[in-house]
Amino acid sequence: MTLRPRRNLVLWSHTASSPGRYPAAPVTRGRRVRRWIRRGALLVLIGLMALGRGVWARWRLVAAGVALTVFGGILHGGPGSIFLLPGLMLLFSAPLVPGRSRARAELERELAAYSTPADRRDFEATLDQYPDDMTRELREILAKQAMAAHRGRIPAFGRR
């Protein structure tokens, strides 16, 4: 006669409620799916916030890319599908375009104070005392502001 090991039998029942005060709701597939959707939405939101900080300087490219891609996707297979590829190209090229930093934007605002031609000549005379590689960015900003100031003028009417 041999001794048999004793086994504890446990019965699992999905219909039985927890022995506590409040019944435990069973974990269903729908609950798991909703949980994963919420987690995924949270991760997408965090990613979009990080992307938004980086894309803010390039928002025109991204907006044009989104518009063309959506338009091409809606009219997929029709004549509007030719907009899909340029839209995707704009979306994928936007991170490659250098953006403006806050320091450069602040520098542009400060240099906008030199608005009269006399102020600009004085400032450029000061810049001439330094090497070009040190003052290149300042000269670029001044040239861009001068071009923007002359952009709205009509040459036939002379100076304002």
Image (cartoon, rainbow, N blue to C red):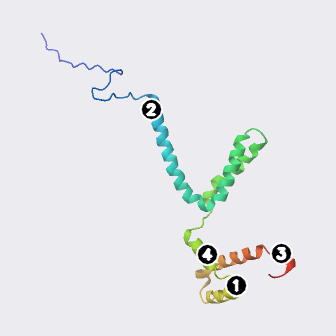
Q: Which residue is mark 2?
A: 31
Q: Which residue is mark 3?
A: 154
Residue 128 image-quadrant placement: bottom right
Q: Residue at x 78, y 73 (%)?
A: 152
Q: Can you say whether 83 is above or below 1 in the image?
A: below
- The quarter of the rendered structure image containing the C terminus is bottom right
Q: Which residue is mark 1?
A: 116
Alpha carbon separation for disc pair 4 and 3: 26 Å
Q: Amino acid at mark 1?
A: Thr
Crowdedness near tag 3: few (<14), some (14–19) or many (≥20) residues, C-alpha within 10 Å: few
Q: Amino acid at mark 3?
A: Ile
Q: Can you say whether 50 is above or below 154 in the image?
A: above
Q: Amino acid at mark 4?
A: Arg
Alpha carbon separation for disc pair 1 and 3: 19 Å
Q: Residue at x 84, y 77 (%)?
A: 155
Crowdedness near tag 4: few (<14), some (14–19) or many (≥20) residues, C-alpha within 10 Å: few
Sequence order check, earlier mark of 4 and 3? 4
Q: At which x and y percent is residue 135?
A: 60, 81
Along the line of sight, which residue is nearer the eye, 13 or 93? 13
Residue 53 image-quadrant placement: bottom right
Alpha carbon separation for disc pair 4 and 1: 15 Å
Q: Which residue is mark 4?
A: 109
Q: Are marks 4 and 3 in contact (CB under 8 Å)?
A: no
Sequence order check, earlier mark of 2 and 4? 2
Q: Amino acid at mark 2?
A: Arg
